[in-house]
Amino acid sequence: MKRIFAVITFVVLTISLAAAQRLPEMARPDNYKLTFTPDIDKATFEGDETITMHVLKPTSEITLNSADITFQDVSITSGGTTQKARVAPQKDKEMVVLSVDNALAAGPATVHITYSGILNSEMRGFYLGKDDQGRKYAATQFESTDARRAFPSFDEPDYKATFDITAVADKGHVAISNQKVLSDTPGPGDKHTVRFATTAKMSSYLAALVVGNFEYVEGEADGIPIRVYATTGKKEMGKFALEIASDVLKYYDNYFGIKYPYGKLDLVGLPDFSAGAMENTGCITFREVILLIDEKQGSADLRKTIASVIAHEMAHQWFGDLVTMRWWDDIWLNEGFATWMSSKPVKSFKPDWNFNLDDVSNTGGTMNVDSLANTRPIHQAADTPAQIQELFDGIAYGKAASVLRMLETYLGEDTFRAGVNAYLQKHQYANATADDFWDAQAQTSKKPVDKIMPTWVKQAGLPIVNVKAQCSGNSTNVTVTQQRYFVDRNKFDAPNDQLWQIPLCLKGSATGDGAAKCELMQ
């Protein structure tokens, strides 16, 4: 997900001692069959859901995440027997406990739920939006913990499953989701039913559905159909985004060594959207003002922003979607990676935009705020939805990107890329941790990446390195020291025992070849 930071500020996050809001490890989903019937005029929707799952051990209860859902009928089938389930909402935990009289055996089971929900006005979950002509539409925004507002689910990133999504839409409304349309048939009544192909395995927060008055321009890259959707009357403003997405897809296909994995790519511009953009698999949603542009009057800065955001979200299709963090405390790796990665493809086909200068500027801004006493470490624990949401800040995006840029420089571009691809190959369609990424880089580079990176991500702040050089005959002795840097002089002068493992590269004029000697400062 791309956040747009107009002013970069960081606030100390105080993690409360609230009980962890994690699902009990009793079952794991394999597939969701979901049918959504939105009533846009009434701002409500009906849902029909079947979850195919694997029960891990005998139990009489299945716990799901659920918020703002009204349950109508729930049954659980296991071992050929179907039981009606009792429903016990736990509103404070955004969970619901489904219980049956006879315990479910370990093994396959299905939960069938009919329910209703609201198309809220909060731009999260399944919500109601409006274009500048007053036409309403329904759209989803699930990251980080709002899929549960659209369907009862195992709404944690580690519970990956496939999805079969169907939309029952008003006549004349377009339906867009993660996968291509399998069928579009009339009915029931004056509606039409759009059934989408089964998705790849993915986390619940990456599911998507948009229903409303939309049209598109289309193209392709490397055999993948690409469409840019806009509300009626604006599709021509999507041509620049289509061009960028085509170039970026080709670049990433080559860089990652894994072809784009989701069959089709839709970019959807929404007038009402809370984030800058969201990396739903195969169906990236955007705030329309950073996707669409009048090519005759749009500014160069807006073009750069559109290209950067598209590249960011498309990087997530591999790093974040194909391989997903196990829990939200590693969201910084997803967002930092996509932020770091986004300038690479744009640099390659728009070198005159000088994105390397933007990288330097962004790193400088990150260092300015990281020198404050109330910054936070990159990696930070989070349990509740509120705590998780707080992790999406400039530290997770800007500082994490800067640290990855430093690591790439230390290892070398080719070696770093090899580590990225080894990580993706090993964990594709599954979940991983930051430690898994560092391990892949360490094994590929034969350097102690797994020892270096915790010093950068698990403590707050940044170091200043002091260098002293003394010439003696034909040699130069260099002494380096480090300490935490604070913009506040009193804090800077106060004792501090923080240390980082810092990759340092030094070069002098004496060698004549300009080669740098790189050492690890500990």
Image: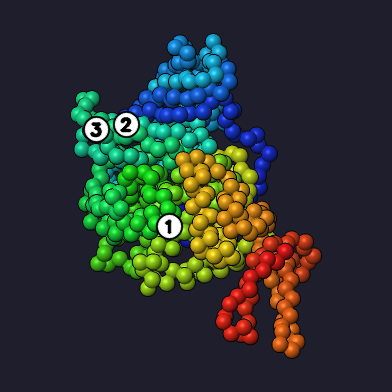
Mark 1 lies on a secondary structure that is helix
Indicate the amino acid at tag 3: Ser
Q: Are marks 2 and 1 in contact (CB under 8 Å)?
A: no
Name the residue rendered at 29%, 59% in the picture: 243
Please state which of residues 169 and 92 is positioned toward the viewer in this rendering.
169
Measured as percent of width and height from the top left, residue 516 is found at 60, 75
Using residue 314 as the reference point, say whether residue 226 is left or right of it.
left
Report which residue position mark 1 lands on. 255
Q: Is residue 68 above or below residue 109?
A: below
Q: Residue at x 44, y 54 (%)?
A: 256
Distance from Cα at disc 3 to Cα at disc 1: 34 Å
The residue that disc 3 covers is 183
Residue 392 appears in the figure? no
- What residue sits 26% from the left and 64% below the top? 295
Query: Which residue appears at 58% of the width and 17% of the height?
Result: 58
User: Mark 2 — residue?
Assistant: 166
Residue 47: image tag = none
